Amino acid sequence: MAKSEALKRAQARYEAKPEVKARFKGYHLKCHVEHDKDIIEKLESVEAVNTYIKELIRKDIAAQS
């Protein structure tokens, strides 16, 4: 389900608050549109990219333990 513009703005206002901002750490991922096409297509196919990436990382951590 796509977020409405009003919901996106409300979320951005909430996340901009200093007390909320201090609780989060963000990361940026750059993908080359030709070389990383498979990654881009996969990320665009999942409903929640953030959750998907976190699950992959947690599975990797568990596999290394």
Image (cartoon, grey):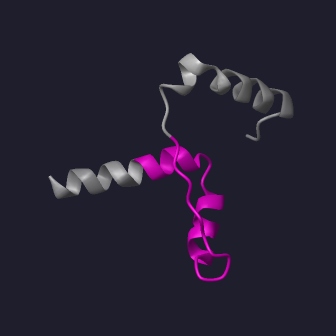
Q: Quadrant of residue 43?
A: bottom right
Image coordinates for residue 9, horizontal then vertical, percent:
79, 29
32 or 52, which is in the foreground? 32
Residue 43 magenta-drawn?
yes
Q: Is residue 50 left or right of residue 56?
A: right
Relative to residue 41, is residue 65 drawn left or right?
A: left
What residue do we see at 77% from left, 36% from top?
Answer: 3
> Residue lying furthest right in this view?
5
| Residue that extends furthest to the left in the rendered view of this protein | 65
Residue shown at the point (64%, 60%) measured from the top left: 45
Q: Residue 28's x, y, as percent?
A: 56, 54
The reply to whether the magenta stretch includes residue 48 is yes
Image quadrant in which the N terminus is located: top right
52 in relation to 30, above or below: above
Quadrant in the picture for residue 33:
bottom right
- 4 and 11: which is toward the camera: 11
Task: Give x and y (percent) for residue 65.
Answer: 14, 52
Q: Which residues are magenta?
A: 26-54
Seen from this angle, which residue lies furthest front? Answer: 18
Residue depicted at 18% across the width and 57% down the height: 64
- Quarter-wise, where is residue 60 in the image? bottom left
Q: Is residue 26 above or below residue 40?
A: above
